[in-house]
Every structure is written in structure tokens, then in C-alpha cells.
Image (cartoon, rainbow, N blue to C red):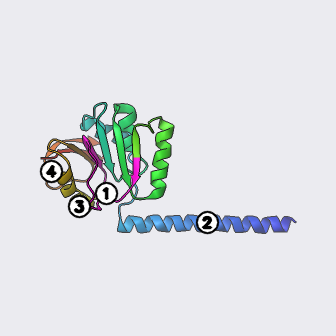
Amino acid sequence: MWVSIIIYLMLFVQFLLLCLFLLIMYLLVRGIFGVPFVRSNKVFSRAMMELAQVKPGEVVVDYGSGDGAIVNVAAKEFGAKGIGFEYLRALVLYARARALLAGVSKNVEFRRENFLSGKTLPKADVVSSYLFPEVNAKLEPLLIRDYPSGTRVVSRTFLFQTLPMIASKKVGKETVYLYQIP
């Protein structure tokens, strides 16, 4: 009997290790061929929203929202409404759970969509991103196409090439940039 339990336990552990290996491989492939998930903690999220001067009732849209940290901070600490776009289903589910735990789920939504698909982007007062330069380069014409003049765009670390930069702020070793749609 004990031998059977040990065998089943060993098979279960092997199964868990295989699942972990597959998850790591998936994330590596995603990181190589897309934008990897790198969390924006509260310090960065708050700095981005402060630089953009987010006001209660404004709409913040975060492209590549990951676990929803930026949108949740915008809703909880600044009284904004938020929309997060994230392609990975697991991160969308995680972001929704985090919003529920933070008590802001009524003021935020997370969409599993490719925002570069060409669809019209949702209305926003502030756009947030933490994306690689090549993704920002693809996103920039969509921002100019769909957002009115004066819409604020805040980016962590990576620049937008043609948007007029309004301000920047050092946060640790990184910089947060504020732009405005012309």
C-alpha cells in the first residue's frame, strides 16, 4: 500500500514539474516573440498616474496591462475608471481577481485583446504603456488616429518617437515619460 502511495506521489510531482517546465517555456517564447510580462509595482504605477495628473472620473487605458497594477492604482488611489488590454488570458484573469481584492472591480475592466488589431481604441483621458519601443512604434499611429488632441500618454522606460514629450520623472533607475497627443 505505501509503495502505491509513493509511486502516485512521485507521478504527481513529475506532473507538476512538467507543468512548471511548460509554463516557463511558454513565457520564454512569449518573451522572445512578444512583450514579456514585467510587473509595474505601486511605486511605478503611482508615479505614472501622478505625472499624468489623473483626476477622479477620468478614464485610464493601459495597453499591455499585465496583472492590472496600473489600472488598479488609477482606480483606487486617483478615483479614475480604467480599462486594461492584455493578450495573455491568465494575466487577464489574475488582473480581474486583483481588482476584486482591491475593491475596484466596478471601476475597471480588463480585455483580452490585441490592441494592435486595427480596431478603434476606447475613449480615454490618459493612456498608459510599458511596452518595448517597437510595440510603441506600432501603437503610436493608432493613438494619434483614435485619441483627440490633448490626450495624455504616460510611458514607463520606453519612448514614443513622434509624440511631443511634456515631462519626465526619474523613478529609481528608470524614467517615466509624459506625452500629449498633438
Give the mark, 3 or 2, whose residue is nearer the N terminus.
2
Nearest to the eye among marks 4 and 1: give it: 1
**Residue type (three-letter) at the residue carrying disc 2:** Leu
User: Mark 2 — residue?
Assistant: 17
Could you say whether the residue bearing mark 4 is in a helix, strand or loop? loop
User: Mark 1 — residue?
Assistant: 115
- Residue 138, labelled with which disc? 3
The Cα–Cα distance between marks 3 and 4, rounded to whole angstroms, is 13 Å
The Cα–Cα distance between marks 2 and 4, rounded to whole angstroms, is 46 Å
Q: Residue at x 37, y 68 (%)?
A: 32
User: Mark 4 — residue?
Assistant: 163
Give the mark, 3 or 4, whose residue is nearer the N terminus.
3
Above or below residue 114? Residue 58 is: above
Q: Position of residue 86 (x, y in %)?
A: 39, 54
Asked if the residue at tag 1 contacts the one at tag 3, i.e. Cβ–Cβ closer than 8 Å, the answer is no
For the residue carrying disc 4, how many other residues have a C-alpha within 10 Å: few (<14), some (14-19), or many (20+)? some
Could you say whether the residue bearing mark 2 is in a helix, strand or loop? helix
Q: Is residue 41 visible?
A: no
**Residue type (three-letter) at the residue carrying disc 4:** Leu
Q: Position of residue 28 (x, y in %)?
A: 44, 66
The image quadrant of residue 141 is: bottom left
